[in-house]
Amino acid sequence: MKLQFQRSLGGTRTFNSDGGFDGITVYLVGTINFGLAPNHRITQRGPFQEGDSDIDFRLDPRVLSLPIVAPASSIEESLAVRSKLLKIFMPGTDKASVRMEWSYNGDSYDRSIDVVVVGGLSFDTDSKDFNVRTVVQLRAADPTWYSTFAEFMTISENIFGTPTPYPKPYPVPYGATAINKITSITYDGSWPSFPVIQATGPVTNLTMVDTLGNILNFVEPILSGDTWTIDLSYGKKTIVDQNGVNKFAALSIDSNIVSWGL
């Protein structure tokens, strides 16, 4: 398994790799809270009710704990390693992520989770050696893992109509023709997802329907070379073109951008 820590202000670092952390080697000796995300039950209680009624549940944020060891052979090297780790895992609001890659039975997997660095490293000392031991804590506001790489799909044009044989006497009446394509997408994730979708034109009457019947229908065409970004993330729900121009008004009145998801 390959595990990386990526931070927008510091690049990519690889655990268990020689010099993988800006010249120092950091060994990951365990993972904590990498399993199912924590959750809480939603309940209600009526007058004179014994107990309560269980309604639903929601996932809670999680804190990933990464116990690490960085080798050092002297007190001076140990202090230098500590200083570098404190700088790498300094708390902040910049975007960071943890990425895992592994293979099993011929299948390859690549998953990531977005985090912020909690910080507060506490170093353990051991009289037997100078190695640096600590636990890195990373908070994931959205506790679900996602596929690291975006999925790309090209929709080819199918032209429906009757070909006209040649030579042909003129004038010849021609019927209407249309370009239409329906493509199904299989989502193999294990949790509901509200993705970021990009659509590149030319496309007219773009319509997307999820498995619950929620619709996103665009009454304005996406011109050739234009790219619209549909961000379905919670708290965003935005549609902009490649220049950042708001395209929310292009949605039809029967569209449900709030509930649409995979």
Image (cartoon, rainbow, N blue to C red):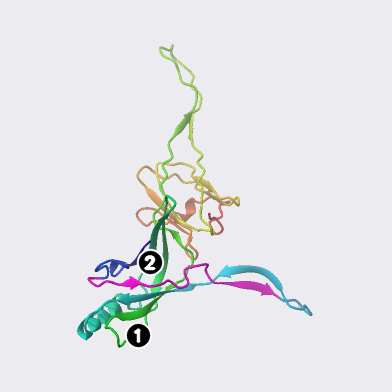
Pinpoint residue 254: horizontal percent, then vertical percent: 58, 51
Q: Which one is in front in this view, the residue at disc 2 or the one at disc 1?
A: 1
**Residue at the location (25% across, 67% down)?**
18
Which of the pair 204/113 is nearer the observer? Answer: 113
Task: Give the mark count.
Answer: 2
Pinpoint residue 23: horizontal percent, then vertical percent: 22, 71
Task: Give the crowd class for mark 1: few <14, some 14-19, many >=20 residues within 10 Å.
Answer: few
Tell me the quarter of the picture where residue 256 sits: bottom right
Tell me the quarter of the picture where residue 73 sits: bottom left
Q: Which residues are magenta?
A: 22-44
For label 1, the SS is: loop
Which of the pair 57/173 is nearer the observer? Answer: 57
Q: Which amino acid lies under the numbered mark 1 shown in the image of this protein? A: Asp
The rendered magenta stretch, by its main secondary structure, is classed as: loop
Residue reaching furthest bottom? 127
- Please name the residue that numbered disc 1 is placed on: 124
Q: Quadrant of the N terminus?
A: bottom left
C-alpha distance separating marks 2 and 1: 25 Å
- Please name the residue that numbered disc 2 is placed on: 97
Residue reaching furthest front? 128
Relative height, residue 45 to residue 204 (above, below): below
Q: Is residue 12 left or right of residue 105?
A: left
Pinpoint residue 127: horizontal percent, then vertical percent: 30, 88
**Residue at the location (39% across, 62% down)?**
100
Which of the pair 76/164 is nearer the observer? Answer: 76
Q: Which amino acid lies under the numbered mark 2 shown in the image of this protein? A: Ser
Relative height, residue 135 to residue 228 (above, below): below
For label 2, the SS is: strand
